[in-house]
Image (cartoon, rainbow, N blue to C red):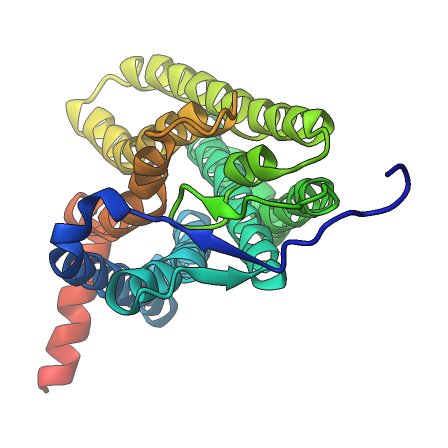
Amino acid sequence: MSGINQTIVTEFILLAFGNLHQFRILLFMAVLLIYMTCVSGNIIIYLLIKLDASLHTPMYYFISVFAILEIIFVSTIVPKLLDILIAHGNRISFAACFLQLFCAVIAGEAECFLLTVMAFDRHLAITNPLNYLRIMSQACTKLALFPWITGIVASFVLTIFTASLEYCGPNIINHFFCELAPLQKLACSDSYVSSMATSVIGIIGILLLFIVIIGFYIHIIIKVLAIKTECGKQKAFSTCSSHLTVSGLFFCTAMAVYVKPSDRHHDKYLAFIYTVIIPVLNPFIYTLRNKDVKSAFIKLLGKKQK
């Protein structure tokens, strides 16, 4: 077997939420509504930032990139889930499965790094306001590209390691999309290297980044508490609270799945939270708690009415 790929599996079967079969139609309607809300909400945020000159700042530039990333993330996973729920389309070809895995890991890993970049942006704006615009004017585009590059590199490594394993049966994945741990579990060959690579990238790309974000915000809190005026404190906290909320929700669920991948039964429910539920919450978190975005939206509505 050495040096020869013994893969004979040509397709995989995604079980998704088969144990909730009696709620299949209801679940389909809920997921479809969530998907449509997520995509439309992030498109609105992106357009608001592009159309309103007052939002042409580094912070909102990163939010616009984040909105596009969220659309790509959910669009990689949710359409196939909808197909499974409404048309029993739970079969996916070998190539399509690993293409979905590749795109999902890119988006997920890029989101982790982009959230860290956004935390750095807020940290720099509050702790070094005099040099903030000078530094960010030079580094903004590079910082926005960096998450995509790291996502592609991490995804390429993990996808190659996992796809190069031998799959000779069974081919049933207890998940709603092609995920690393369930695929590694199905392999006939030793998946130690692939699983170890997943853990290492999970530790670096999720756990370590979350610690860095927490570090940034601890320093921000210290600086904010030193501000004498209550108005200044409130403004500083308001610009950070939305991002900290999004980061906490995303990283905590992702860490539970990726830092020590083991294909536990409840992992797909955790994955459902960070791939479907959290992305639909983000537009509301960034708009309902953000006066600038709300005022830009009201201004845009006023122009349309005229």
* Residue shown at 49% from the left, 37% from the top: 112
For the residue pair 209 and 143, the one nearer the viewer reads as 209
Rendered image quadrant of residue 221? top left
Q: Is residue 302 above or below residue 45?
A: below
* Residue shown at 73% from the left, 27% from the top: 193
Q: Is residue 253 above or below residue 89?
A: above
Judge left or right: residue 191 versus residue 256: right
Residue 266 in the image, given as x and y percentages of width and height: 32, 29
For the residue pair 29 and 229, the one nearer the viewer reads as 29
Residue 181 in the image, given as x and y percentages of width and height: 53, 34
* Residue shown at 23% from the left, 42% from the top: 19
Q: Residue 243: in sight, yes or no?
A: no
For the residue pair 201 and 163, the one nearer the viewer reads as 163
* Residue shown at 28% from the left, 18% from the top: 227
Judge left or right: residue 136 versus residue 276: right
Quarter the N terminus occupies: top right
Q: Residue 4: in sight, yes or no?
A: yes
Judge left or right: residue 60 versus residue 33: right
Quarter the C terminus occupies: bottom left
Residue 268 in the image, given as x and y percentages of width and height: 36, 37
Q: Is residue 105 above or below residue 192?
A: below
Rendered image quadrant of residue 10? bottom right
Rendered image quadrant of residue 24? bottom left
Total marks shown come to: 0
Residue 9 in the image, given as x and y percentages of width and height: 63, 54
